Amino acid sequence: MIDFMDIHPDVADALAAAKPVVALESTIITHGMPWPDNDRMAGAVEDIIRAEDAIPATIAVIDGRLKVGLSQDERQDLAQVKSAMKLSRADLAYSVSEGRTGGTTVAATMIGAQLAGIKVFATGGIGGVHKGAEKSFDISADLDELARTPVIVVSAGAKAILDIEKTLEVLETRGVPVVGYATDTMPAFWSRSSPFPAPLRLDTADAIARFFRTRSGMGILGGMLVANPVPQEAEIEAAEMAGYIATAQADAERQGVSGKAVTPFLLSRIVELTDGRSLATNIALVKNNARLAARIARAL
């Protein structure tokens, strides 16, 4: 793997000493918000993980090198790239072989984490089944990755722009455990609850780590999703968000937005519709997930 992957010295030292490490995605840097807000947010999330006595490992591809852990200079440079690819399983190796630069989605970050030996990954929300998927077949590769790659993914559930009910059905079919953290209800990204029950519930980082170890010990393949509700003070209630989401989706359909461009378009449009409130909530939930992920990594 030395031919295509660079592990930051801090991450390599922690892994060699069996110390806790938390992987972080990079599409939130390359496609989530503009410079310099994206770099400030990414730096703040890394600081939260360090404050929890764990090591952050932001994963990205830079000039054809799969980076597991970024220096401050690398992160700042990545945050200013205008033409970064949005990388998933299908094109991660392409970006490496062609010397490209890109941000890693949930699926690609899980692959990078597994290659490096990292077991816990914090993100905002996973991809899933898009509304209207019965016609478009637009289903995120994140779901299949969760079924095959043994990494704990801590998120605020699936992004609320998705069909959460169908996303849960696909995860169940793929055999992916979905654990509500201290909740019986699935969170809906910006909102603490949705109409759908969480399939499983655990209330501590130790219990989540024990569950993961038990699955591994029994030879059950794949990862698991931990659904961590956004802090109450940062929540935008689901009934209010529903109107913004419907408007953004109608705009996307009218403009013919499709494929990988759909999610960034919807998130950006919702930021406009909420006068920036959704972005503040997004940042709060990412930080909350990073904190929990670090505690799970310590428990492991």
Image (cartoon, rainbow, N blue to C red):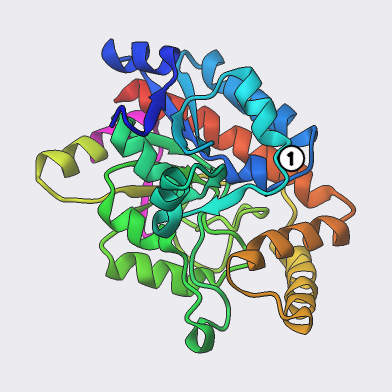
Please say if 272 is above or below 150: below
For the residue pair 237 and 146, the one nearer the viewer reads as 146
Is residue 22 found inside the magenta-colored segment of the image? no
Count of numbered badges drawn on the protein: 1
Q: Which residue is mark 1?
A: 233
Q: Is residue 39 left or right of residue 229?
A: right
Q: Is residue 130 left or right of residue 205?
A: right
Which stretch appears magenta? 199-211
For the residue pair 112 and 210, the one nearer the viewer reads as 112
Q: Residue at x 44, y 28 (%)?
A: 22
Q: Which SS class for mark 1?
A: helix
Please say if 174 is above or below 288: below
Q: Position of residue 143 (x, y in %)?
A: 39, 61
| Res 107 visible | no
Q: Position of residue 139 (x, y in %)?
A: 47, 71
Q: Position of residue 93 (x, y in %)?
A: 39, 49
Q: Residue 246's image quarter?
A: bottom right
* Residue at far right of view: 275
Q: Residue 144's image quarter?
A: bottom left
Q: Residue at x 63, y 75 (%)?
A: 258
Q: Residue at x 86, y 62 (%)?
A: 273
| Res 275 visible | yes
* Residue at far left of view: 218
Please say if 255 is above or below 8: below
Please say if 61 is above or below 256: above
Q: Amino acid at mark 1?
A: Glu
Is residue 201 found inside the magenta-colored segment of the image? yes
Q: Position of residue 207 (x, y in %)?
A: 31, 34
* Residue at far bottom of view: 135
For the residue pair 117 and 160, the one nearer the viewer reads as 117
**Quadrant (top left/top right/bottom left/bottom right) for the C terminus:** top left
